[in-house]
Amino acid sequence: MLRGLGQWLCRICGAPTLQSLQHFLNDGEVVSAWAVAEELLRSQSTSLKSAEAVASLAVAAAATGRLERAAQLLEVLDTPDLLQGSAQELAGVHSVRDRILELLAQSRGEGALFGGENLGVDPAPKLQVPETWCWVAQLPPVAEFVGPLEIRWNEGCERGLFATRHIFPREVLLLARPLAVHSGVWAYSTAELVEQLLDACRNSARTRCQLQCLTDGWASRAPPTLAVASHALWPQPDSQPMESLGSFLTREALVNVVDRNSFHVNSKTAIYGLPSMINHSCGSVNASANILDPLGDAILFRAETEIAAGSEIFFPYFKVSGSLHRRRERSQAMGFSCRCERCAFEADTLPGTNAAAASKAAMDAFESQLRDQMADLRDRPEEAGSHCMPLLQEILSHTRRMALAMDHSWREREVAWYLHLALPLYWCGVWCCTQVWQYELLLKAGEMSVSALLQEGDPSLSKCAVTLVAARCELLLQMVLAWEHTDRHSYDHLKCCYMLYLAFMEMCKLPLSSNHYWVPLVQQEVPLWRLEERPQHAKHATSTELYATSRLRCETAFCEKFGVGSDYLCLGGTQCRVTALMRTLHP
Ligand SMILES: [Zn+2]
Ligand SMILES: [Zn+2]
């Protein structure tokens, strides 16, 4: 059972010794190390009263996922008279205990990682141990944790992860350590990952069980039952594999596992067990993932939104801001064909409707002329101002036609998916607003400050300002909504939230004859806002109210993304952290 151990066995009775245990730990063969530890514990050797022995046993236990057992072995520290060793060794074993208690807390969902903030992760602190204790390096940098989740079959007859209770935004869903990691170019990662997996399979029964769960569908192997999959993929102690590699864990099968289950996050490619059960969606994403480089490339999943009990967890395997066609290409390249609700909406529900015609007309106009006009104006900024107004008006006529063509039975996310189809047009409109405004200011303000000019009440400038800010608010409101149900909390989403907040803030500063606006409820949950018209089903709102709403919306988005409160974000203040936080998303 214990390979390559000869020189470390006791010369008198042939039993394994403390040195054999440390030898295996130094080689990274933690499962064999624990097998030796069990032998030693069974033999009740008196040498186990030394600080070094206790620390080695505890490290072997923790390294194989036996955190409770490790803590129990260290209970001897509570009666210090029983323990022998130098002052340095005694300090070392205490340092090991501190780390193990921290890991134990993590495995129960407690500790710093489980707080709401997401502003970078510190590496586990260095252990204060004697220099010769190199084997402490086998202490895991982080413990695995699974939140209120279970594996179930979804409607598409695939396995998925489901919430077993109501989950709040920012809650940690699960924390898993990798089975294999590659940090170079994605295209060259497969061969190396497969080698790592084969290696791990030889030593670890747990890795083998996890990989067996990921090979279903391969060579028409029947998928394991939910009970088997849950048992294999939940955190559990590791042990030595009893039988030789099963016929299904071939190199070929593992290539398939890597192709289908790789996570590409933070420029790394890695294979995980339980996280592979999370399905992809282009439009109902409710979880985000972060690979924690300083913590051994463990992956941390958090809830991005509230998740109702019984709902499936979805995580985007790729950037979902592309078109249906583009998303299909991406999903097929990853070995599946996306049938998420958003794809179904775009492929089945939308075609043939007035709404589809309106969005097609808008995007056709954008692609055939509006985009070129914008590019042309961008090259000639001195002329942009005067020509942008007609361009803006044409864009608004398209977006308004789209809004009116929407189906009244749609829910908020269907509206969002629909608006997303014409997003480039909305960006173009926002660009026009800022261009015209700069032009008007240059023309009218000259040496005077803008606020002084507005104070003076130049009527034409005020009117222009109102029109432009109103248009910006109108476009950005729809853009924020579009992002909320697609690439939620992406760089672009947060940018739009911030721009919307700024637009409403400007709106509040304008000297307007009336401070009252109408928020037409095109349908119940979609507040589309227009300044000049007053549709039949409109809700009355002041610019101050709309400003407050947009501010809250922006703060909520940053809070859900980074876990920071409004005090930290300091929106609009001199210490405003919006830009600094957004920079972390665009390295
Ligand atoms: Zn002996
Ligand atoms: Zn999809």
Image (spheres, rainbow, N blue to C red):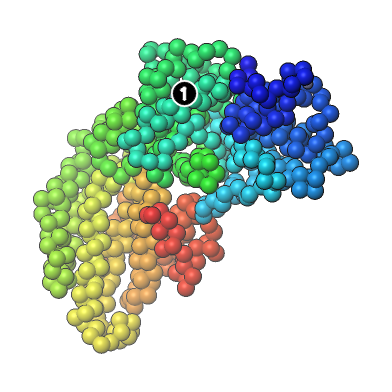
User: Is 65 above or below relative to 78?
Assistant: above
The residue closer to the viewer here, 362 or 160, is 160
Residue under pointer 1: 198
Q: Position of residue 497 (x, y in %)?
A: 38, 58
| Total tally of numbered discs in the picture | 1
Q: Is residue 305 visible?
A: no
The quadrant where residue 39 appears: top right
Image point 30% across, 59% down: which residue?
Answer: 474
Residue at disc 1, secondary structure:
helix
- The amino acid beneath tag 1 is Leu
Q: Quadrant of the C terminus?
A: bottom left
Q: Position of residue 446 (x, y in %)?
A: 23, 85
Image point 38% across, 41% down: which residue?
Answer: 184
Q: Residues within 10 Å of mark 1 (few under 14, many from 20)?
A: some
Image point 39% across, 69% down: which residue?
Answer: 505
User: Is 535 above or below relative to 6?
Assistant: below
Image point 21% across, 35% down: which residue?
Answer: 351
Q: Position of residue 504 (x, y in %)?
A: 37, 66
